[in-house]
Image (cartoon, grey):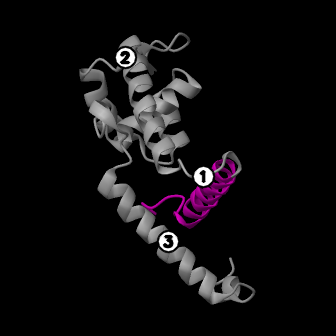
Amino acid sequence: MPTSSDMTTHTDPAVLDALQHQVAVFARRAEQSRLGGVGQVRNSMDRAAYLLLNRLDQEGPMGVKALAAGMGIDSSTVTRQVAPLVDAGLVSRATHPEDGRAVVLQLSERGHARLDEVRASRRALMALVTQEWSDGERDAFCTLLTRFNSSLATLTTSLTPANPAS
């Protein structure tokens, strides 16, 4: 794996300094606002719940292990984060159709409705934040932010030991 000095040789250090600073500012502002939307729904769902519900909505019912793997977190974290969603009726547990011992998590009707409500609020916030941007600027930012997040996920995965217990 290349060292950090290898990676910065061909890139202007001032650009990398500005980028890391803007990422830090973004993280702080995102945490301050929680990017939770606008109106009555603002900040009504934490990040973990939103990401879990969103994944179940996009990929359909799945087990805890598959959900954890897809989110890049461990199964115990998913179990802990899903419990209040089940208690609130947003996620339901069902028996796996092929393996009666396994549990499958799925978004309930109430979960779908709640997720739609939160998405609409967050969509309104994104529209407000980028109201002076062109459609092309929004598209470019989304493309680059998606690429940044993907690169960060790949790097994080490659830096995580395969078996930390060893």
Q: Nearer the viewer, mark 2 or mark 1?
A: 1
The kind of residue tagged 2 is Ser
Q: Residue at x 69, y 80 (%)?
A: 2
Q: Residues within 10 Å of mark 1 (few under 14, many from 20)?
A: few
Query: Circle 1 is placed at which residue position?
Result: 133
Q: Secondary structure at mark 1?
A: loop
Residue 122 screen position, x and y as percent: 43, 38
- Distance from disc 3 to disc 1, alpha carbons, whole Å, reads 18 Å
Sequence-first tag of 3 and 1: 3
The image quadrant that residue 157 belongs to is bottom right
Is disc 2 in contact with disc 3, using a CB cutoff of under 8 Å? Answer: no
Residue 101 screen position, x and y as percent: 43, 17
Relative height, residue 61 to residue 10 (above, below)? above
Query: Circle 3 is placed at which residue position?
Result: 22
Relative height, residue 78 to residue 120 (above, below)? below
Q: Secondary structure at mark 2?
A: strand
Specify the farthest residue to the front. Answer: 132
The image quadrant that residue 154 belongs to is bottom right
| Magenta-drawn stretch contains 104 | no
Residue 137 screen position, x and y as percent: 66, 53
Labelled disc at residue 92: 2
Q: Residue at x 37, y 42 (%)?
A: 48
Sequence-first tag of 2 and 1: 2
Q: Residues within 10 Å of mark 3 (few under 14, many from 20)?
A: few
Question: Magenta stretch: dominant SS?
Answer: helix
What residue range appears in magenta? 137-166
Labelled disc at residue 123: none
52 left or right, relative to 161: left
Q: Residue at x 55, y 83 (%)?
A: 17
